[in-house]
Amino acid sequence: MNNSTRDAIYTLGRTQHETTRLIEQSKIYGGSTKRLLEAAGIANGMKVLEIGSGAGDVALTVAKLVGEKGRVVGVDVNPTILGTARKRAKAAGITNVEFIAGDARTLNLSNDFDVLTGRFVLMYMANPGDALKHLVTHLRPDGIVAFQEPEYTIYPALAHPDTPLMNQLIAWIVEVFKASRAHLDTGIGLYRAFVEAGLPEPTMHLESPVGAAETWAGYRYMATIFESLLPLLEKYGLATAPQVGVETLAERIRREVLIAKRPFFLPPHTSAYTRRTN
Ligand SMILES: C[S@@+](CC[C@H](N)C(=O)[O-])C[C@H]1O[C@@H](n2cnc3c(N)ncnc32)[C@H](O)[C@@H]1O
């Protein structure tokens, strides 16, 4: 990971569409997040700090895992999206979670958390290792650290000559995240970030949602990603709205999968967890 002096622009924008996209994203990535949280050892009664909460999906999953005796504090720099997270918690009858607006790196938080976690958030921070080093100070001495971050550097390797649409979409995704200064390698870079933060070497997994069934939700989800990315794709001169064709994108991907007989890959991500020992 090449650290920077400036945070990334939030590549996917701050629209209501983006909030909806995050909720859709969680339906696809939620299974792998739950596996990470359980493998990391998150259990009944724990107090959890979850950073970059967005619409609240990770915090709500954690809230169920820690139960009524546990507590979750979710933090996001975007106060508007936390309104949605709070409403969703209330609608689900979840009372052991609170959401605080602010930059996770500078908020005044207590130092008695059992767990520090986050999904797809360190990639936007100028220096994820430094951020993690500070964030772990909120943990008890044997606290758990568990993160999931995307790994865009290997995404182009999943493309194939007979899937031109998938290849183009992957190229646009990589270019727009790079142009907005997001880290492309935070997934695999979690190893370095954990070690630089003084943590023991993490257990890690790399995976990607893959689908080829006609009814797979991933085609539609890819179109929602592009609806969020379009303003920056256009701003950076990488693609125009007619070139992307969001309205027909899901159907065109589905057709390419059928013709090429190759499954479609959504962005790969890495899960990493460890336990603080000092
Ligand atoms: C891609 S979204 C992921 C949301 C959620 N973790 C999920 O997986 O559904 C990243 C979120 O991190 C938040 N974020 C980025 N930098 C942050 C920071 N320094 N402190 C707190 N939140 C931050 C953004 O506002 C955004 O809501």
Image: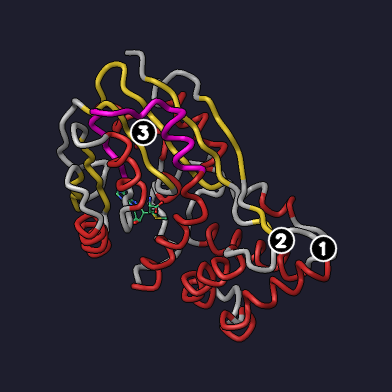
Q: Which residue is mark 3?
A: 132
Residue 48, position as x, y percentages in the image: 26, 34
- Residue 79 visible in rendering: no
Q: Residue at x 53, y 25 (%)?
A: 203
Q: Residues within 10 Å of mark 2 (few under 14, many from 20)?
A: some
Q: Secondary structure at mark 2?
A: loop
* Res. 219 in view: yes
Residue 132 shown left or right of residue 28 in the figure: left
Asked whether, in this view, residue 222 is left or right of residue 55, the answer is: right
Sequence-wise, which precedes: disc 3 or disc 1? 3
The reply, left or right, for residue 134 in relation to residue 265 is left
Quadrant that contains the C terminus: top left
Cβ of mark 1 under 8 Å from ligand 1: the answer is no
Question: What are the residue bounds of the magenta stretch?
Answer: 32-51
Q: Is residue 254 above or below residue 204?
A: below
Q: Position of residue 260 (x, y in %)?
A: 83, 66
Q: Please, what is the three-letter code of the amino acid marked with disc 3?
A: Leu
The kind of residue tagged 1 is Lys
In the image, 197: left or right of 110? right
